[in-house]
Image: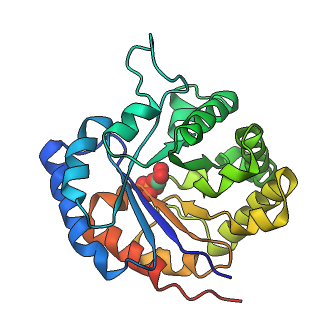
Amino acid sequence: MAMRPFVGGNWKMNLDANGATALASAVALGAPACQGAVDIVVFPPFPFLERVARALGDSGVELGAQDLSSEANGARTGEVSAEMLRDVGASWVIVGHSERRQHLGETDARVADKLLMALESGLRCVLCVGESLEQRKANREAEVVGSQVAAALAAIPAAQVHSVVVAYEPIWAIGTGVVATPQDAEAAHGAIREALTSRYDSALARETRVVYGGSLAPGNAKALFARPGVDGGLVGGASLKAPDFLAICSAAAHRLIAH
Ligand code: PGA
């Protein structure tokens, strides 16, 4: 059975306050065309969360943050807690994005702590995994994503996994314009589901959404979403333009899965 697809817009460290409001309003306006058939979530920078929540209103588009602290509260200058995110209307959070793993020293252990904190606080999570170009050249992609999934979910009980979407984001495809082939994505999603099967069981692995991220665009989304086991996408650059983001949401909503 095909699952309800998920499309997230990761705005990263872009836009200003007015731009964030305008983008959220445009997404909210266009989203009803594909709703009912796809979960749409936008992930603005922290300072814009509240205004984006207001702009989204009751459009059905959900709000997420790009990161959270692994601590509940206290002396962690600059950090933002899960409770604070919920307080301003976020219901989702991205955990373990490769840009944080690469540039901000986020380890598998830290990712696991953040995931646990987010889920225990009632946030739903997009857990990002993906291999580097070197690892892919060495044919290690399945091993890398498998071990990232296993590490992140080691402390997460089966009952909480329905609140997790796993995003397969090969590092070499992020922001590069080089997109994974639908076959490569399907294979990596298979490896992620094998890791979920080892950690839990095959039923839970089938029921967990695994989405693709990395240079997704209106022109390539349809072919990727047509592969079995590719349940939507996490969109960076193209999520900053409402028409492009909405076209990707529409591709997910109307996907025809090849067999
Ligand atoms: P991109 O980013 O679509 O700009 O490649 C995707 C992501 O990092 O989530």
> Which picture quadrant has residue 196?
bottom right
Report the residue that reaches farthest toward the right. 198
Q: Residue at x 43, y 33 (%)?
A: 83
Q: Is residue 249 left or right of residue 233?
A: left
Name the side, left or right, on which 19 lies relative to 46. left
Q: Is residue 23 positioned above or below 112 on the image? A: below
For residue 169, say whether it is visible.
no
Q: Nearer the viewer, residue 58 or 10?
A: 58
Nearest to the observer: residue 216 or residue 230: 230
Picture residue at 34% right of the left edge, 37% below the top = 87
Q: Is residue 15 above or below residue 248?
A: above
Q: Position of residue 253 (x, y in %)?
A: 45, 80
Is residue 87 in view?
yes
Considering every residue shown, the one lying at the far top of the view is: 75
Location of residue 242 by image quarter? bottom left
* Total residue callouts: 0
Residue drawn at (68%, 82%), measured in percent from left and top?
1
Which of the colour schemes (rainbow, by chain, secondary structure, one colour) is used? rainbow
Whole-percent x, y for residue 202 in the image: 83, 65
Q: Horizontally, is 1 left or right of 194 in the view?
A: left
Residue found at x 46% / y 65%: 7
Foreground residue among 58 and 196: 58
User: Front-most of 223 and 176?
Assistant: 223
Q: Quadrant of residue 191?
A: bottom right
User: Could you tell me residue 21's position as x and y percent?
Assistant: 17, 52
Q: Position of residue 62 (x, y in %)?
A: 37, 58
Q: Is residue 97 above or below residue 109?
A: below
**Which residue in the rendered view is the most extreme toward the left?**
18
The image quadrant where one finds the C terminus is bottom right
Q: Is residue 28 above or below residue 103?
A: below
